[in-house]
Image (cartoon, grey):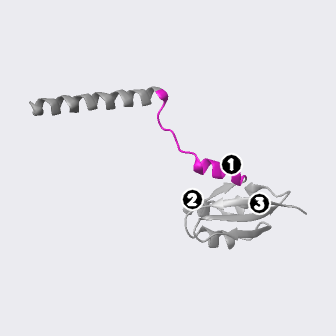
Amino acid sequence: MSWVPIYIRGKKGFKDAVAAKREVTWLRGSTDGEVDLAMFWLRQGDDLVDLKRAIGSKLIFKFRIHFITDLDVHLAHLNKTPTFFSDAEKELILNATRAQELIRENRSARFAR
């Protein structure tokens, strides 16, 4: 029988609440006290949906639990800096910043006279 690692991330205190649920066969893996990330082992044939049902929607929403099947993808996502502006919006912001700098320069030149 082979086991598949599942990583679970949530708000503080979720690890004990999740560990109390034993309706699905899984093994508790490692946990880190400083990081709210825990590893569990599911049997190869078991479905992640069964684990979610065993934990229950109340706990999932209470602790904002996320289920991660690929840790590398998750870590790459955490390290990625989000870009909220399109290239056109960035250009507009840059132009507005330049215009504001010109206004400041003109004001300081008037006061220098």
Question: Which mark identifies residue 3?
Answer: none
Number of numbered discs visible in the structure rendering: 3
Measure the C-alpha gap from mark 1 to mark 2.
19 Å
- Tag 1–tag 2 contact (CB < 8 Å): no
- Foreground residue among 91 and 38: 91
Residue at image position (63%, 69%) is: 32
The x, y position of residue 34, in whole percent, is 57, 69
Task: Pick the quarter of the image with the N terminus.
Answer: bottom right
Mark 1 is on which residue type? Answer: Val
The x, y position of residue 21, in whole percent, is 70, 70
The x, y position of residue 44, in whole percent, is 85, 58
Q: Which residue is mark 1?
A: 73
Q: On the image, which quarter does residue 30 sit in?
A: bottom right
Q: From what the image shows, is residue 101 above or below residue 76?
A: above
Task: Pick the quarter of the image with the C terminus.
Answer: top left
Residue at image position (72%, 52%) is: 70
Q: Which residue is mark 2?
A: 64
Image: magenta residue range? 70-87
Q: Earlier in the sequence, mark 3 or mark 1?
A: 3
